[in-house]
Amino acid sequence: MFIKEAIPSYVKNSRGRRSIQIKLVTYEGRFSASAPSGKSTGKSEVACYNSRGIEYSMRMLKIFCKKLKDKNFIIKRIDDIKQLNVLMDKFEKRYGKFGGNVYFAIEAAFLKAASADTGRELWKFINDDINKGRKPKMPMPVGNCIGGGLHSKKIKNRRPDFQEFLLIPKEKTYARAVTLNLRAYEYARKLLKARSKNDESAWMTPKTNEEVLEIIRKVADKYKLRIGLDIAASAFYDKKYYEYKNKKLTRDKVDQADYIEQIVKKFKIFYVEDPMDENDFGGFTEVLNAVSKNKTKSLIVGDDLTTTNPRRVERAIKAKSINAMIIKVNQIGSILKVKKVVELCQKKNITMIFSHRSGETFDDTLADYCVGFGGQFMKSGIYGKERLIKIKRVIDIEKSLKNLQHCRSK
Ligand code: PGA
Ligand code: ZN
């Protein structure tokens, strides 16, 4: 793979903030990738940019990209990305850390170019490597329908304390699942009488957690969907207590775990992300233990807890804190570490949810990563241009697989 040119630039993300895009020009074509950014970030995530800010990262990148010009790389599988990492490491020693977002964009652009070089699409390039080319099972969508917490503005000075109220279909095809989520999203708007959307295009409301849970249960029942929550508990955890604002209430660690167990039972919640503080591995274990006894066999999902970091994932698995986890590539800023996390999940039967960030770009790499690495779910919102582009990419992959099957059976 011969790099004729590598061009970094700024793009705006869905929050109107600057993000980094990289375009590679090779003999196969032009390949670009841009990075998303989170708002309710885990403390153990890698920083998005150099500590001196995005502009410093951009300056570094411009110098680095000049060095990539006219270089040849042989990238036939994911591990071969080491050739790029060695160069980046050397460069970082002199200038400082690039940051996870720069890594996301540059590695994704490299993998896109490398897969084209080997005549495959990105998901297939990854799948051939990690899943030995077995036909992938399509993921199910995890769609953010109603929002609260850090992603939502207050209405009449109130908002739900939980960050995301999610809809999760169980359908034969991803395309049908997405259609159901869109219909349910419209129905939720009616029930809520919602007028505005938050950072991830989920409906905003002044209602309490319980009021929203009643509504989302009704929506899910009508369309036969499962429901999920991203509690994002660290956002309202203050040293020792969970400080609820709507309605005002303080829960200690034991109360919080009990409360989660109760609502999981009462509302038949299938998926609970970050129910406890991001460093409370033991608290997660208690919640997982409690809900394992239920019929629903709910997923207890680590996000801020695990931050796609192999060491934290190993710890969470050892402590039996989770049975599912969020994978966000820019959280760790290394595709090789993501690969390690995927291998751990596969080995230990941990369900994988590949996830967007609240500040998204028009990049659709998430879809290829999810299908290629074999994620059971893709969390990418229900609505909004930056979200729909990723959903459409999975639909296209699903269609191409069906056509392939059709041709084979002829
Ligand atoms: P973030 O939040 O992208 O703002 O970090 C998403 C999440 O917590 O799942
Ligand atoms: Zn989360």
Image (tube, rainbow, N blue to C red):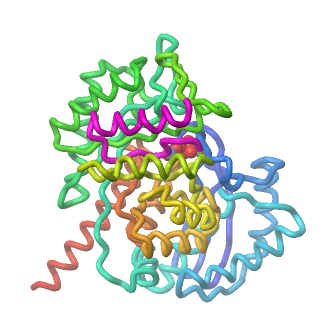
Q: Please indicate, yes or no, whether residue 105 appears anywhere in the rendered image.
A: no
Q: In the rendering, at what x and y percent does residue 369 appear?
A: 46, 67
| Residue at the image point whose x is 29% and y is 53% from the top | 297
Q: Number of numbered discs present?
A: 0
Is 385 located above or below residue 409 in the figure? above
51 left or right, relative to 296: right
Q: Is residue 25 visible?
A: yes
In this view, the residue in front, 27 or 87, is 87
Q: Residue visible at 65% across and 86% down?
A: 73
Q: In which quarter of the image is the C terminus?
A: bottom left
Measured as percent of width and height from the top left, residue 30 is found at 55, 70
Classify 161 as above or below 79.
above
Q: Residue at x 53, y 27 (%)?
A: 251
Residue at the far right: name it. Answer: 94
| Quadrant placement of the N terminus | bottom right
Is 258 a magenta residue? yes
Image quadrant in which you'd find residue 403: bottom left
Q: Where is residue 361 in the image (x, y as percent from the top left)?
A: 53, 49
Which residue lies at the image location 60% right of the left edge and 40% below the top edge?
39
Magenta-highlighted residues? 252-277
Q: In this view, does 41 lie to the left or right of 303?
A: right
Q: Is residue 48 magenta?
A: no
Residue extending farthest left: 410
- Which image quadrant is residue 336 in? bottom right
Task: Name, please, the residue furthest toward the top.
Answer: 156
Q: Name the spot of residue 257 as percent of width and height, x first.
A: 46, 39
